[in-house]
């Protein structure tokens, strides 16, 4: 009997294969068809394929703002038709599938066709960026919460109301901005309506990967500093007083680093 159609949306995390969940690893190694985002690192993909007697078919379905990308409708059609044809379809997505990754739309399209959808969490890049900066999202001396926001809204939509977000940050919420690099100037201008220019701000490009880059700045200089240092996408912009915790934390003696597992 043919198995009931099934598809998994799996969070591949920020790129370092050691940051994959065990469930993500197990699920992606069950795939007969892997649909891979371009934010998924080669190292993670290699783990999905390593030692498979019958390797899955791999289709890269990258989607990059401003660049040539695979239309969303095409990706959804492919997932649906392959799952109905009996493939074990695994959609491997950067970070967590539920954070600005259109995972919700994909799950809805699959369920509409009676396909069982399994969603496996991944570590979102905003969390990896905070870790790269050496601060938690919510150090209790500086922040009572966190806002995850995208600077990029649907075609034709307005961007977020930065002044409102700035007011929230002024109340002690850390702002973690995804897809912000093309709109840094607007973000800076809008937030400045509610936050002083010396508010700490930072950009982390390629968080959690070997080529990770940091730019530490203030709100008043953020766009100029990030552009001068040549930072680009994919990057997380983090704004808030929680960055002040960085100095106090870096003054503490650091623990001996744990040697990396052999994942290659
Ligand atoms: N689902 C993903 C986000 C997809 S939206 C997640 O949970 O991380 C794409 C945006 O995510 C990029 O424009 C960038 O802002 C951010 N991003 C993804 N991977 C990143 C990385 N390794 N370092 C920094 N930002 C990253």
Image (spheres, rainbow, N blue to C red):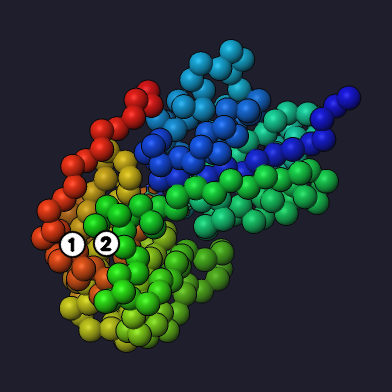
Q: Which mark is residue 135?
A: 2
Q: Is 160 placed above or below 236 here?
A: below
Q: Residue at x 44, y 33 (%)?
A: 44
Q: Nearer the viewer, residue 4 or 163?
A: 4
Tell me which numbered mark, 1 or 2, is placed earlier along the sequence.
2
Image quadrant in which you'd find residue 259: top left
Q: Nearer the viewer, residue 156 or 236?
A: 236
Q: Which mark is residue 249?
A: 1
Q: In the rendered image, is residue 227 in sight?
A: no
Quadrant containing the N terminus is top right
In the rendered image, residue 65, in percent from the top left (x then y), is placed at 46, 52
In the rendered image, residue 128, in percent from the top left (x then y), is placed at 35, 52
Q: Residues within 10 Å of mark 2 (few under 14, many from 20)?
A: many
CA gap between label 1 and label 2 equals 8 Å
Residue 110 left/right relative to 38: right
Residue 219 left/right relative to 125: left
Q: In the rendered image, is residue 45 in sight?
A: yes
In the rendered image, residue 234, in percent from the top left (x then y), is placed at 37, 50
Q: Residue at x 30, y 54 (%)?
A: 131
Q: Nearer the viewer, residue 260 or 106?
A: 260
Q: Nearer the viewer, residue 68 or 184?
A: 184
Q: Residue at x 52, y 34 (%)?
A: 25
Quadrant containing the C terminus is top left
Q: Is 87 placed above or below 175 here?
A: above
Mark 2: secondary structure = loop
Residue 159 left/right relative to 120: left
Mark 1: secondary structure = helix
In the rendered image, residue 96, in percent from the top left (x then y), is placed at 51, 51
Q: Is 42 placed above or below 70 here?
A: above
Image quadrant in which you'd find residue 222: bottom left
Q: Residues within 10 Å of mark 1 (few under 14, many from 20)?
A: few
Residues tagged 1 and 2 counted as in contact (Cβ below 8 A): yes
């Amino acid at each position: 009997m043919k198995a009931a159609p099934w598809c998994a949306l799996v969070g591949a995390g920020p790129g370092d294969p050691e940051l994959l969940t065990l469930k993500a690893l197990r699920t992606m190694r069950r795939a007969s068809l892997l649909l891979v985002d371009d934010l998924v690192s080669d190292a993670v993909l290699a783990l999905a394929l390593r030692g498979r007697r019958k390797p899955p078919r791999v289709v890269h379905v990258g989607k990059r703002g401003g660049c040539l990308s695979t239309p969303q409708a095409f990706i959804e059609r492919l997932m649906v038709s392959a799952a109905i044809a009996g493939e074990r379809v695994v959609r491997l997505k950067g970070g967590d599938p539920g954070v600005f990754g259109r995972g919700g739309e994909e799950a809805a399209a699959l369920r509409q066709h009676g396909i069982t959808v399994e969603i496996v969490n991944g570590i979102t890049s905003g969390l990896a960026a905070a870790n790269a900066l050496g601060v938690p999202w919510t150090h209790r001396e500086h922040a009572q919460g966190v806002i995850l926001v995208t600077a990029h809204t649907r075609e034709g939509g307005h961007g977020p109301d930065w002044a409102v977000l700035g007011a929230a940050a002024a109340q002690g919420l850390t702002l973690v901005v995804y897809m912000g690099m093309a709109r840094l100037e607007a973000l800076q201008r809008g937030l400045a309506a509610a936050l002083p220019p010396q508010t700490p701000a930072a950009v982390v490009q390629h968080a959690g990967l070997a080529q990770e880059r940091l730019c530490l700045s203030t709100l008043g200089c953020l766009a100029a500093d990030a552009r001068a240092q040549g930072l680009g996408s994919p990057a997380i912009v983090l704004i808030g007083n929680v960055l002040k915790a960085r100095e106090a934390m870096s003054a503490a003696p650091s623990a001996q680093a744990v040697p990396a597992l052999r994942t290659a």
